[in-house]
Amino acid sequence: MTDITTPPDPTQNASLRELGSELMRDHLARKLDGYALYLYGVVLKRLELLGEAAEVLVEAAHKEPMHWGSWLELATLITDRTKLNSLVLPDHWMKHFFLGHAFLEQQLNDDALDIYFALQQQGFEKSTYLIAQTAIAFHNRRDVDTAITTFRRLQKCDPFRLDNLDTYSNLLYVRELRVELARLAHEACEIDKYRVETCCVVGNYYSLRSEHQKAVLYFQRALKLNPQYLSAWTLMGHEFMEMKNTNAAIQSYRQAIEVNRRDYRAWYGLGQTYEILKMFFYCLYYYKQAQQLRPNDSRMLIALGETYEKLDKIQDALKCYYKARSVGDIEGTALLRLAKLYDKLNEFSHAAAAFTEYVTNNEPHADKNEISQAYKYLANFFVKRNQVDEAYQYAQKCLEFEETKEEGKALLKAIAQKRSQQEEGEMQVEDSVSVIRVRPRLAEGTPNNQFTPMNLSFTT
């Protein structure tokens, strides 16, 4: 049986409720300073009195604006931009750090970067916190190379800093930079092997080596150090998925959502898990949650579209694929899905248009099997329409791939036959025209006055 560390339910903690009652009495008597208000806000949040917690934490920020803990706890209670704009915050420079952090949590990465760049120009250019936050913003925007470069700069500024190294290790994992990830894991262990970030980095290292059991062990170690550590819950869910342990994966993702309901990766992971279990209505719900958190992420839209297809909701699937294409197709699959769906619907012209755009936009970095099949489809499409020049162009492309080389040769033979037939037809037309021009006009009513359809086209 898989051991998963599950934090206790704080709402069932009698001591916490008693502490909340005491703080409430002192709050009503106006006896709480900024730090005590922060404590009261945290207690209310743990008791799931979220509205009251937000009000108290705003009050704490007014009384003690330099206490960053109040701002951080407040940020976890902001569900959207409307809620953020409704807060009456103190007119203090710390507010800008809070807004940048809140925008980042809301996946409003461009707004966050604007604030962070402005702060760097106002005297905080050497702040390692701001460098790390900009790296995270680039990570959220899927600008992996810029994010890695920023983290490397951060390490040069402060080689002993462990904060946010879990995010850095995720980026190295995505790029499969094994040597650099191994070095990072070794350095983190030398600095402090009992930090949650260190456990996460080492877990990612073992995951990249496909040693999933060891990876899970390190993520569990991180959770023993801090049961509220979001990254470990999500990454452990991914590992259980790799190990095909869907029950443990679901439990891990659910715990991640309990820690932070804005973690789109956990919602997306739940969607993938239920998709494997073929429970498509559950799958649809979780993908929708992920898409709401990342409205401009084409991966969420593609996942939604595929689920709608499986539920036979074709129009909804088409809408998802079109939107994925319009927001910027990260993985280059939206057009491919559109083309295949149109082909399934027997809308061949639309399918060909989508395939044409797909091969034009994705040729350098597309999956070889997918792009070769796209070329084959287009070659066949134009052969059937007797557009031999276009068909020849795509059939030649088929020869570049092992998967379609033989079919490409067969298509070229068929194209050559069609081309020769067309040339023969053109010659016959020319001969008919010349006969019409030189033959004397016959008397009406004679047997020779029976025009063929080909002749009729030239007597208008």
Image (cartoon, rainbow, N blue to C red):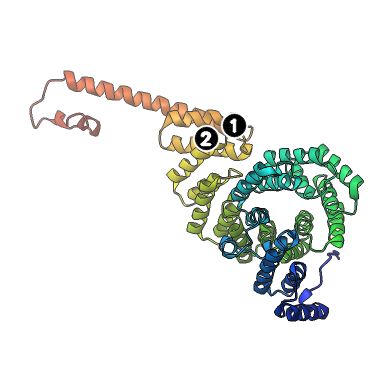
Q: Which mark is residue 360?
A: 2
Category of crowding for the residue at label 1, using alpha-carbon neighbours closer than 10 angstroms: few (below 14), some (14–19), many (at least 20)? few
Q: CA distance from mark 1 to mark 2?
A: 23 Å
Q: Position of residue 291 (x, y in %)?
A: 59, 57
Q: Residue at x 82, y 52 (%)?
A: 197
Asked if 229 appears above or below 366 in the picture, the reply is below
Q: Residue at x 73, y 65 (%)?
A: 254
Q: Position of residue 348 (x, y in %)?
A: 45, 45
Q: Is residue 135 visible?
A: yes
Q: Which mark is residue 307?
A: none
Mark 1, residue position: 406
Where the C terminus falls, by quadrant?
Answer: top left
Q: Earlier in the sequence, mark 1 or mark 2?
A: 2
Asked if 425 appears above or below 276 in the picture, the reply is above
Kindly identify the amino acid type of the residue bearing the numbered disc 2.
Answer: Thr
Q: Position of residue 146 (x, y in %)?
A: 68, 39
Category of crowding for the residue at label 2, using alpha-carbon neighbours closer than 10 angstroms: few (below 14), some (14–19), many (at least 20)? few
Where the N terminus falls, by quadrant?
Answer: bottom right
Using the rendered view, name the quadrant where residue 53 is placed: bottom right
Kindly identify the amino acid type of the residue bearing the numbered disc 1.
Answer: Glu
Q: Is residue 143 visible?
A: no
In the displayed structure image, the side of residue 417 where residue 443 appears, left or right: left
In the displayed structure image, the side of residue 342 where residue 175 appears, left or right: right
- Quick one: SS at disc 1? helix
Given residues 258 and 446, the one toward you in this image is 258
**Mark nearer the viewer, 1 or 2:** 2
- Quick one: SS at disc 2? helix
Q: Position of residue 153 (x, y in %)?
A: 75, 38
| The residue positioned farthest toward the top in the image shown | 438
Given residues 95 and 189, the one toward you in this image is 95
Using the rendered view, name the quadrant where residue 194 is placed: bottom right
In the displayed structure image, the side of residue 145 where residue 190 appears, left or right: right
